[in-house]
Each structure stands twice: as C-alpha cells, then as structure tokens.
Image (cartoon, helix red, strand yellow):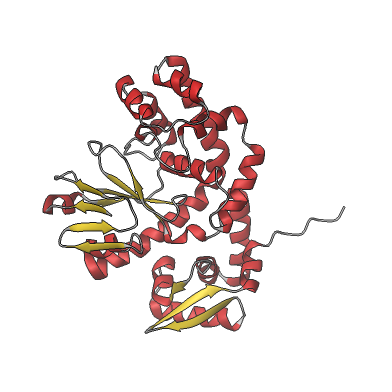
C-alpha cells in the first residue's frame, strides 16, 4: 500500500493541474501502445499508431518505456508550462549523472545498445531522444490534443465540485476506488508498499488521459512529488481534432449545445449532478435535458440510491460517432 503523508503546509501547497502534461501523456501512451488491453478508445488509437508511427521513432522510446515496471524519471520532468517544446528541452538538459542513475534502474530488455549509448549522455544520443519525443508527440498525441484537453477539463470540474462539498480530502479519496484519506495520510491499497513523506513540498495532482487503472508517480522521492491519476472520462471517445470539431458541430446543429455536450458526457456513466457540473448548468436544467435525451432514446437512466445515473444508449453512441456520408460524384 502506498501511504503519502501530508503536513498542514503540504495541504496548502497541493495543486490540481488544469491541463494534460505532454510528457506524462507521451510516456503513458507509449505503455498503452505496447499492450493489447484497455478501453475501446485506446484500442482504436493504438491500431492507428501502430500503422503510422515510424519504427525508428518508436523503438528507442519503447526501449525506455516498458509497459510494466520502471520508466526513467527524467522522461517526465516537472515543468510549469504546458508547452511540449519546453518539456522536451527540460528532458534534454537532465544532468548526465541523473540520466545514468535512472537508466541503471531500467530492467534489461530490447534496445540495450541504444540504452547504453544514452547512458553516456552524449549530445548525439540526447538529440536522437529529443527528435523521437517531438515526432511521437506530433504524430500520436497532437492530432488528439483538443479531445484530451476537454476530457481533463471535464474531470477537473467534477473534482472542483468534490472540493466544494468535501474539501481536499474528498478530492484525494476520489482519485481511485482504493484510495482512502485518513488523518492526513492518503492511502492507495492497490499500489506497492511505500511511505512518501511530502515534508512541506506539497503534491502536484496530475490528471491523465492515458493513465489507466492505477495512479502512478516518480520513483525518486527527492524529486518534486507528483501523483498522476486516471481521469473519469478516459473511457470516452478519443477523436482526431478535425473529426471532433465536425462531429460536435453537427450534433450542436441538431440537438443544441447543451444537449450535445450532455450526450458526449454520458459515454461515461454520470449522475445528474455530475452532468450539471461537467456542462456548467443548473441541476434542474440537467434533469430536464436528460429527460429529453432519454425520451429520444439517446441515453438510459437508472436510480442508484438517491442519485440517478445516466449512460449513452447504442443509438446515442451511433449518433455521436457517425461520420457524414461521402458525396456522390
């Protein structure tokens, strides 16, 4: 079990990022690229990337990012800016001693010659790493970035509502089903045994689209503490930017903006109050609009205790993912 100990100063310095981190998304998506499980949207993205990504880009990166076990901490530096260029520059400026120590922790696997070269931290190999990261982000993530950003913004709105109703403890406890907040300690039972004392540094909570099943963090406890966690909407649709814009425009024209956003949000089961928070509307309005969508057969609803939970129907999913017919010549 992972136990993270907070002091009063840590609670004051704990932050929830409002945007995806480009290098954490790169690392975690590389993990997803190498396995065959995960939610449906990951699979569609994975098949496309396996077809189109250049092997000379993928191989050096997957050698550093095995899907199970340790990936070097220096691949995900703490950078205040969301700029991928600044983040990659931070990777390339990692001190040689730290590159060597991180790579020494990497389990032996394919790509050993490349890892040995990188451990020497010569300018040519670091430049090759920088090139691979830039091409990978440009090809595998940038075309989907607006979709990833929107999913993370939706998740953040839900956590802001948790903070208002239950404080920071409620936010921390809802990061994962096996997370518990007890007497200033965040416990996550599903993670390996470890005690992390923040000691006044605070904790950066980093939501991630490609983080799946379990939160993750840096191995080196001397680095600025970060806890990366899977967002609630990660099982939603991951669409290319042009497809996403076209689809939303068509849906708004037919359903109106609020109903279109609500339909897209119900790809992941959501309560009426969660939908209201995600779409920025009153609970009463959300309740009325879900009734309209339900009558149209686009969503289904069920009662769970005092809450009503809504999820998209097959008809609604077909409408959400439909592409326009090609014009006849």
Considering depth in this image, is 6 or 13 the residue closer to the camera? 6
Point out residue 196 in the picture as x, y percentages from the top left corner: 21, 47
Asked whether the viewer can see residue 222, the reply is yes
The outermost residue toward the right is 329
Task: Kindly identify the residue that appears in the image at 40 percent across and 21 percent down.
Answer: 119
Residue visible at 70% across and 59% down? 323
The number of discs equals 0
Task: Answer with left or right where residue 294 lies relative to residue 127.
Answer: right
Q: Nearer the viewer, residue 18 or 203?
A: 203
- The quarter of the image holding the N terminus is bottom left
- Residue appearing at x 49%, y 31% in the figure: 109
In the rendered image, residue 121, in percent from the top left (x then y), is placed at 39, 18
- In the displayed structure image, the side of residue 303 where residue 194 appears, left or right: left
The residue nearer to you, when weighing 327 against 62, is 62
Left or right for 147, reference 98? right
Q: Residue furthest front?
A: 108
Q: Position of residue 233 (x, y in %)?
A: 46, 60
Q: Is residue 231 above or below residue 77?
A: below
Residue 267 in the image: above or below residue 100: below
Give the quarter of the image for residue 279: bottom left
Vertical comparison of 69 with 249: above or below: above
Which x, y percent locates residue 318?
Answer: 66, 67
Using residue 177 as the reference point, say whether residue 35 is left or right of it.
Answer: right
183 in relation to 27, above or below: below
The answer to whether residue 239 shows anywhere in this view is no
């Amino acid at each position: 079990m992972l136990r993270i100990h907070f002091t009063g100063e840590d609670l004051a310095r704990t932050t929830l990022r409002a945007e995806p981190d480009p290098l954490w998304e790169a690392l975690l998506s590389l993990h997803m690229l190498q396995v065959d499980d995960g939610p449906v949207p990951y699979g569609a993205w994975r098949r496309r990337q396996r077809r189109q990504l250049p092997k000379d880009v993928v191989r050096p990166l997957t050698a550093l990012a095995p899907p199970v076990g340790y990936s070097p901490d220096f691949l995900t530096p703490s950078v205040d800016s969301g700029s991928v260029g600044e983040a990659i520059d931070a990777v390339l400026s990692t001190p040689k001693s730290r590159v060597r120590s991180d790579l020494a922790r990497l389990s032996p696997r394919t790509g050993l010659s490349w890892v040995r070269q990188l451990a020497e931290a010569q300018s040519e190999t670091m430049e090759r790493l920088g090139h691979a990261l830039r091409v990978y982000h440009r090809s595998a993530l940038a075309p989907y970035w607006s979709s990833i950003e929107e999913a993370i913004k939706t998740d953040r709105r839900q956590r802001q509502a948790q903070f208002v109703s239950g404080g920071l403890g409620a936010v921390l406890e809802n990061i994962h089903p096996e997370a518990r907040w007890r007497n200033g300690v965040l416990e996550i039972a599903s993670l390996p045994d470890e005690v992390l004392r923040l000691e006044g540094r605070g904790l950066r909570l980093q939501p991630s689209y490609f983080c799946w099943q379990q939160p993750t963090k840096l191995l080196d406890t001397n680095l600025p503490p970060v806890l990366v966690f899977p967002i609630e909407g990660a099982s939603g649709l991951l669409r290319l930017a042009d497809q996403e814009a076209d689809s939303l425009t068509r849906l708004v024209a037919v359903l109106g903006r609020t109903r279109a956003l609500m339909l897209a949000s119900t790809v992941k089961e959501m309560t009426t109050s969660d939908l209201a928070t995600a779409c920025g509307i009153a609970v009463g309005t959300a309740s009325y609009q879900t009734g309209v969508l339900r009558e149209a057969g686009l969503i289904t609803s069920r009662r769970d205790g005092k809450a009503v939970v809504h999820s998209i129907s097959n008809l609604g999913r077909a409408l959400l993912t439909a592409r326009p017919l090609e014009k006849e010549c």
